[in-house]
Image: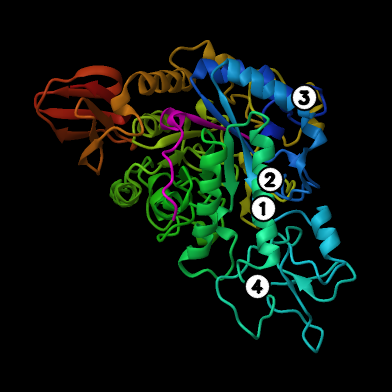
Amino acid sequence: MPPFRPAPSWLADAVLYQIYPQSWADSDGDGIGDFAGITAHLEHLSWLGVNTVWLNPCFASPFRDAGYDVSDYFALAPRYGTDDDLARLVDEAGRLGIRVMLDLVAGHTSDAHPWFRASAEDPGDHRYIWSAPEPDGTLPPGFVRSPGSRPGGYLPNFFDSQPALNFGYARQDAAEPWRQPVDAEGPRANRAALREVMDHWLRLGLSGFRVDMAHSLVKDDPGLVETCRLWGELRDWLDTTHRQAALLAEWGDPQTSVPAGFHADFLLQFGGPSDGLPMRSLWNNGTGTVHEHWAQREHCYFEAEGRGSAETFITAWRSAAALIDDKGFISLPTSNHDFSRLRCGPRTAEQLPPAFAFQLTWPTLPAIYYGDEIGMRYIPGLPEHEGSVLEPTYNRAGSRTPMQWDATPGAGFSTAPADRFYLPLDPDPDRPDVASQRADETSLLHLVRRLIALRRDTPELGSRGSVEVLHTGYPLVYVRGERYLVVVNPRLAPVTFPYEGDPRPVEVRGVRVRDGAIEADGFGFGIFAL
């Protein structure tokens, strides 16, 4: 790998916020969120203390997978607005000290993309992975029949409507002639196209990309060696061309993706040697909603019954952090658009404060999924929408419902009739909203704001400070930067832990340090100065 330059200096202090653009704020009354709606609500993020935003895909698309099926990387989807609308969003965000990142779908396009339509008619085009039909007319396993005059079929990367871009195969096989090497003409053209797309948007003022399915580019790649080499080449180009741009991976394996060239990677419910177990062992945001492959395999730590342990997560984090060292960052999200929210299943609103106390004081980059800061919940039982259903029990729509800005019937999201909303609102009459919580200083929203401010003003609590873990059971007890004691009790029952000292409370709810012990009430947390 090339000797990468350090990550952009601003990234170490980033508090990330993920916006699902079609669900955040609708400015024109069509029921779908847009750029102007985001711009109109940037003050919320500024007040909260967020300084980095990433938007789910907003490129032209037929929306069979909610925009992850791109039909033109250089055009914005009209539902969100124009190039000028995005420019205003980026400019206004910059004025407020907020950077904006886009979501880059690198491994596939829509089958409506002109590249694919041309490839489906031209047997000499190798931008995608094509196989010839077998003598009996069948296709190799996994291939989808060509929609054009080209015989044979193509390899999809996710849904059948998302043909995989050809970045080559790490291993060739004479019996499978579609396995082109990574330096073949098609793979070279696609690597060049990635640079062109990234360069286009970075020159317009965007601050980087979160890369979808970043591990999926080179096929049959043991150890992902060739995939890592590909991203290393792109990182080397980025370092020389756009030095302040950040590259975040949807990989789920920071100890592989960061040395490969990414500045940071998200811990996810899947990915890595343990297939997402560390994240699921922390907070299982999939209760009753995810495919059994990603279902909980042990009790998670942030549950009321208190049957879990933080040891699984912390051990995995230590291992990854040691390998990454100062090359980049691990990002810890509250949730995202693919999995249930932090408030899901049996997890109630009163269980969220200790989760945020942990997330915003642990040495990772925190990523807040829109609405989690007010305790929006996963909504079960919604209809399939834009590819949201992957399995009968796995519907992602429940995590993509409209942002709840106020207590009006439309929740301040849109003036459109409710039946035209992108997705239905949470029907609970007591659903949380920004306006109500902003007026209540005891709310979750105010707590998250105070925790972000404390993190911003206290380097020891940031992404680079040291951590000494004193206890991984209940309560979780650790010291940051040798100066701050953090206590988190995610279970309902109170707990105690022996501790000698008289630390000063900084942000505390239901935790006391006295008589040689830490006493933590159910769902209590505390940050103390030593």
Which residue occupies the extreme right position in the image? 149
Q: Does the CB distance between marks 2 and 1 fall below 8 Å?
A: yes
Mark 3 or mark 2, which is nearer to you?
2
Residue in view at x 48 percent, y 70 percent: 222
State the SS at label 4. loop
Q: Secondary structure at mark 3?
A: helix
Q: Earlier in the sequence, mark 3 or mark 2?
A: 3
Q: Amino acid at mark 2?
A: Glu
Disc 1 or disc 3, which is closer to the eye?
A: 1
Q: Is residue 496 left or right of residue 276?
A: left
First-in-chain label (1 vs 3): 3
As measured in the structure, the alpha-carbon distance from the residue carrying label 3 to the one carrying label 2 is: 20 Å
Is disc 2 surrounded by few (<14), some (14 to 19) or many (20+) residues within 10 Å? few
Q: Nearer the viewer, residue 428 or 58?
A: 58
Residues shaded magenta: 1-19
Mark 4 = which residue?
180
Q: Which residue is mark 1?
A: 192
Please tell me how crowded label 1 is: few (under 14), some (14-19), or many (20+) other residues with Cα within 10 Å: few
Residue drawn at x 77%, y 85% as measured from the top left: 134
What's under tag 3, amino acid-wise?
A: Asp
Q: For the image shown, how many numbered marks are present on the structure?
A: 4
Task: Find disc 3 in the rendering and name its residue.
Answer: 84
Residue 105 at x, y percent in the picture: 65, 49
Cβ atoms under marks 1 and 3 closer than 8 Å: no
Q: Which mark is residue 512?
A: none
Q: Is residue 141 above or below residue 186?
A: below
Q: Are marks 3 and 4 in contact (CB under 8 Å)?
A: no
| Precedes in sequence: disc 3 or disc 4 | 3
Q: Earlier in the sequence, mark 4 or mark 1?
A: 4
